[in-house]
Every structure is written in structure tokens, then in C-alpha cells.
Image (cartoon, rainbow, N blue to C red):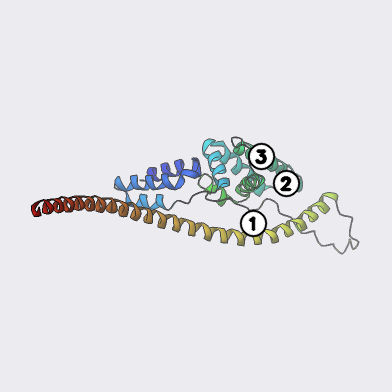
Amino acid sequence: MEDLLEDAKAELYEADPDGFTTRRQELADGAREAGQPAVAKQIAALRKPTRSAWVVNRLVRSDPEVRARLDALGADLREAADGARLRELTTARSRLVDELTRAALASLPAPPAALREEVTATLDAAIADPEVAGRLGSLARAEKYAGFGTTGLISFAAPAAPTESAPVKEPKDPAEAAAEREARRQQKINDAERGLAEAERTLQAALATEHDLEDAVRGLESQLADARQRLAEARRQSYRAESRQQRATRELDRLRE
């Protein structure tokens, strides 16, 4: 049962999303015909991916090493304890995300900047957040990491308070000053990302509505096909009845002559 669902996910989330809805219905119908209505319901509930989500899904499913590399770097970043190591890993993160973004978009002719940005943001989020990483391969939309903390990419320690024996504050180390500037910058980013999170919740609701309307359209299309079939049969019956009426009229006219 689980294999049937996973096979459906593998096919749907790796294939071009333009054919997603039709193929999803076919796979759900196949599961139902195979006597697995619960799996059919799960397949029918799979969400159609956005273009950027599909690009990432396809990359992850075509190359198993992608997820492992993202997971390993994310774990290293969360365990880093000093500034030098963080800077080293941050550089590695930028290189990896750039490499994977180019690989994901390689087969697309002139991908738009917005698509590239969403792919990059999703890969960054997968490094920062294990939950996002766990959804790779079956994403319905692009992801973006909204915050920094114990699972974030960078954390900063507060400067130690001056002791009584050192009342005069020593000049800050250039690396420490840079870290504080980065912390202020990240705070501004976090504020902006909270606004983005609200927009993404709105998007999620819109996607849910889209899914519901897709189901409604399928139902209406089925009703329309049935109505057309009944109309065609009614037209055939009408034609036969009209032919009988004409023959009867001719026969009556002949008898009256």
C-alpha cells in the first residue's frame, strides 16, 4: 500500500506539473480499482507543485546525494561554535546553494529571476530547517526560512559584561564588530520575513482553494460528459421518431387520395 503511494509521489513530483492534475486522477483511479481506496484518497489529496517547487523536487529525486549534502551542511552549521568556523561554513553554504540552483535550472531555457530566487531560497531553507529538508522531493511550493535561532544558520553570543578590574571597554575585535552588524542586518531580515510568512499563509489558503476547485471542475466535467451522452441519445430518439412521423404522414396522404 505504502509503495503505491510513494510510487505516485515519485512520478507526480518529478514530472512536469502541467500534467499533474490529470495524472493524479489516473493514479488515484488506479489505486481505487486495485482495491486500495485509502491510498486513492491520499493520492487525490497530493498538492500540485509550483514551478519552483517542481524544479527542486526533480533535482532531489534525480540525485540522491543532494539531500545528503544539504543535511550534512545544515548539521555542521548548527553545531559550529566559533566565528571562524561559521564564516567557513557560510561560504560553503553559498557555494553549495549556487551549485545546486544551477543544476536544478540547467534544463530550463532562460529561467526567470523570480524562479531562480525561489529555488535558491528553498535550498537555503532546507539547510537551515530539518523539517523543510524532510519535505524535499514532495514540495508543493517554494520554501523560505523565516528566522534564526537554535536551528538557524547563524547565532551570535552577547558581548561579555565588563568586569570591575576592566572598567574601560576594550575596542571591539573587527570580527566581533562585523558579527554585530550582521546581527542587526538579520533582525531587519527577520522582520521582513514575518511579512513574507503571512503572505505565504495566504498563498497556502489560495492553493487549498485551487485544489478544491480542481475537484469541483472534475465533478462538473463528469456531469457534462454524462449530459452530452444523454443529449446525443435523445437526439437519436428524436430523429427516429421524426422519421416515423414522416412515414406515417405519407401513408395517410396516400390512403386519402
Outermost residue on the left side: it is 255
* Distance CA(mark 2)–CA(mark 3): 15 Å
Outermost residue on the front side: it is 257
In the picture, the disc for residue 146 is 1
Dot 3: element = helix
Outermost residue on the right side: it is 168
In this rendering, position of residue 139 left or right of residue 37: right
Q: Amino acid type of disc 3?
A: Leu
Q: Residues within 10 Å of mark 3 (few under 14, many from 20)?
A: some
Dot 1: element = loop
In the picture, the disc for residue 130 is none
Which residue corresponds to the image point at 51% horizontal and 56% vertical from the top-left?
A: 207
- In the foreground, 55 or 160: 55
Q: Residues within 10 Å of mark 2 (few under 14, many from 20)?
A: some
- In the foreground, 79 or 100: 100
Q: Where is residue 174 shown, x and y percent of the image?
A: 85, 50
* Quadrant (top left, top right, bottom left, bottom right) of the N terminus: top left
The residue wearing badge 3 is 96
- In the foreground, 151 or 81: 151
Q: Amino acid type of disc 2?
A: Leu
Q: Nearer the viewer, mark 2 or mark 3?
A: 3
Which residue corresponds to the image point at 71% horizontal and 54% vertical from the top-left?
A: 155
Q: Where is residue 197 shown, x and y percent of the image?
A: 62, 59
Q: Is residue 107 above or below residue 250?
A: above
Q: Where is residue 230 shown, x and y percent of the image?
A: 27, 53
Q: Nearer the viewer, mark 2 or mark 1?
A: 1
Q: Is residue 204 above or below residue 28?
A: below
* Distance CA(mark 2)–CA(mark 1): 19 Å
The residue wearing badge 2 is 86
Dot 2: element = helix
